[in-house]
Amino acid sequence: MHKKTDDIFAAPLREMIDFKFDERVVAVFPDMIQRSVPGYGMIISNIGILAAKYAQPGSHCYDLGCSLGAATLSMRQRIKQPECDIIAVDNSPAMIERGRELLARDCVPTVPVTLLCADIKDVTIDNASVVVLNFTLQFIPPAQRLALIKRIHAGLKPGGILILSEKIAYSDPERQHFHVELHHDFKRANGYSDLEISQKRSALENVMVPETVACHQERLQEGGFSSSELWFQCFNFASMVAFK
Ligand SMILES: Nc1ncnc2c1ncn2[C@@H]1O[C@H](C[S@+](CC[C@H]([NH3+])C(=O)[O-])CC(=O)[O-])[C@@H](O)[C@H]1O
Ligand SMILES: O=C(O)C(=O)Cc1ccccc1
């Protein structure tokens, strides 16, 4: 299959519907995420670097909300510890189906990968050394986020890490405006029209809820993590690593 360009929001929509990770999105997802998230490629590469450092022998690494498995592939290429495996989870059947094909194609036989089509709220997390939430927590209703962070913390071994990447918000309206505008400029520079930007923004409004970095850091602390470090930020996109 050749690489498909994201034109999902290019034509005027008669009625606005909520954004869904369905077959149409899956078909264009690599293009969509690359053109929409500043630093996405760099974050994926560095998830591999972090996993290589923190994966422990005989432990599980989790990729929660794995989409097509980009973070899983990056970890699989880098992890050298013996007896490690990766458990990659997504609740979109279309994502998991396509992710399975891509994983099979990129065959490095070293680190076994289990792909699960499930809600991350129902997945047992245990004996974990590395847990990845790469732009997934933002799709979990805010009231359910602390419980998930607590379960991740409880499932991590001592010395384990959580890598948390998110679209972020600012409590100061001027700073919020500054970052959102720059993100829209980034999307425009990557070929999205004003109509595409505004229609996608409306479609995401009810399904994706960004929070401030301070809010994430407080929740990580409340969830039991001893410290967290903001290791990447570009405009309103950030990635943190939290230590058990
Ligand atoms: N409750 C849930 N349970 C399981 N999966 C979920 C849930 N809610 C949303 N998802 C899944 O989380 C993914 C979010 S995309 C992650 C990118 C990937 N991490 C990447 O590194 O390329 C981010 C984005 O598109 O902005 C989608 O595949 C959803 O189906
Ligand atoms: O496109 C956006 O505006 C985003 O916030 C990022 C994104 C990327 C892919 C799916 C959903 C949101």
Image: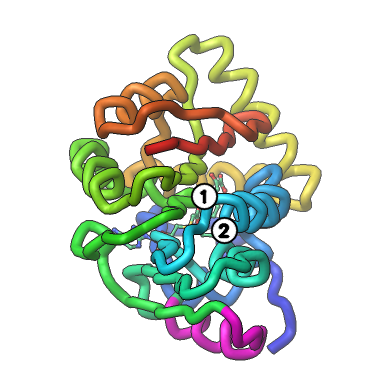
55 vs 95, nearest the viewer: 55
Measuring from the top left, give residue 87's x and y in whole percent. 40, 71
Sequence order check, earlier mark of 1 and 2: 2
Q: In this view, does 42 lie above or below 213?
A: below
**Residue at disc 1, CB closer than 8 Å to ligand 2:** yes
Magenta region, main secondary structure: helix
Q: State the image quarter where residue 61 is shown.
A: bottom left
**Number of callouts in the render?**
2
Q: Is residue 196 left or right of residue 216?
A: right
Of helix, strand and loop, which one carries label 1? helix
Question: What are the residue bounds of the magenta stretch?
Answer: 96-110
* CB atoms of marks 1 and 2 within 8 Å: yes
Which SS class for mark 2?
loop
- Packing grade of label 2 (10 A; few <14, some 14-19, many >=20) is some
Q: What residue type is labelled 2?
A: Phe
Can residue 7 be seen by looking at this rendering? Answer: no
In terms of depth relative to the viewer, which is nearer, 202 or 29? 29
Taking the spot 37% from the left edge, 28% from the top edge, the residue there is 226
The residue carrying mark 1 is: 200
Whether the magenta-drawn stretch holds residue 103 is answered as: yes
Give the residue number, with chain letter if any, for mark 2.
9
Give the image's coloring scheme: rainbow
Quadrant of the rendered image containing residue 174 = top right
Point 63% across, 60% down: residue: 32
Which circle marks residue 92 in the picture? Answer: none
Question: Relative to residue 221, is residue 144 depicted above or below?
Answer: below
Residue 22 x/y as whole percent: 42, 72
> Distance between the Cα atoms at labels 1 and 2?
6 Å
Disc 1 marks a residue whose amino acid type is Lys
Queried whether the magenta region covers residue 99, the answer comes back as yes
Name the one closer to the observer, 64 or 59: 59
